[in-house]
Amino acid sequence: MPASTADHTLHRNLPMLLLRAREKMMVRFRPVITAHGLTEQQWRVIRALNESGPMEPRQISDICTISSPSMAGVLARMESMGLITKERFAEDQRRVLVSLTPQSVKLVRVITKDLEAHYRELERKVGPEIVERVYRAVDDLLAGLESCDDEAVA
């Protein structure tokens, strides 16, 4: 949609568009996650740990885009629910490694089956080529932004 003549910006509101797209996606996926007694944040943590293996809370925060203060609460609740375990590093007791429990691994298998059905339905409705283009575009956008972040730090 082109910018109106009253609007002097040259670009559409990309952050807003990405948020709208996220919400349209989550409307489909949220019921599956909540049906298993999980919050979206808890599912993101479980999925990240399942894909990447045990990590420190800071790493999980980065991957899941959950602030460190919020992450502490999320992990505490998940630990009390038996979804994760925390293990202190022998060489540095301040550092903690977070891992999935067998209960979480089972949840991943169950929930993934339901989510995959929603992905297949999405591909049926909008086309697998569009879904693949979105994956590539978001991957490229993230890579470019992370490259810019790396340059700013250097």
Image (cartoon, rainbow, N blue to C red):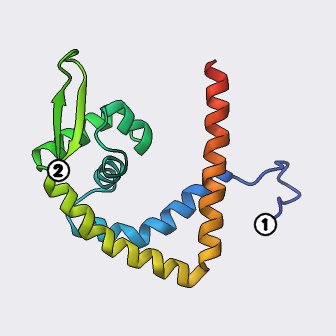
Give the residue at the far top of this rendering: 91
Q: Nearer the viewer, residue 13 or 97?
A: 97
Asked if marks 2 and 1 touch (Cβ < 8 Å), the reply is no
Q: Which corner quadrant holds the C terminus?
A: top right
Name the spot of residue 69 as percent of width and height, x first. Answer: 32, 31
**For the residue labelled by badge 2, is the local secondary structure a helix, a strand or a loop?**
loop
Task: Please state which amino acid type lies under the numbered disc 1.
Answer: Met
Task: Tell me which numbered mark, 2 or 1, is placed earlier along the sequence.
Answer: 1
For image coordinates 26% across by 66% down, the residue present is 109
For image coordinates 21% across by 63% down, the residue present is 107
Name the spot of residue 74 as percent of width and height, x first. Answer: 25, 42
Disc nearest the viewer among 2 and 1 = 2
**For the residue labelled by badge 1, is the local secondary structure a helix, a strand or a loop?**
loop
For image coordinates 74% across by 54% down, the residue present is 12
Please indicate whether residue 57 sits to the left or right of residue 5 in the image: left
Q: Which corner quadrant holds the N terminus?
A: bottom right
The residue identified by callout 1 is: 1
Q: Look at the picture and state if 140 lies above or below 29.
A: above
Task: Please state which amino acid type lies under the numbered disc 2.
Answer: Leu
The residue identified by callout 2 is: 83
Q: Look at the picture and state if 26 lies above or below 151.
A: below
Give the residue at the far right of this rendering: 5
How far separated are the C-alphas under marks 2 and 1?
Answer: 44 Å
Name the spot of residue 99 as percent of width and height, x first. Answer: 22, 42
- Crowding around mark 1 (Cα neighbors within 10 Å: few <14, some 14 to 19, many 20+) is few
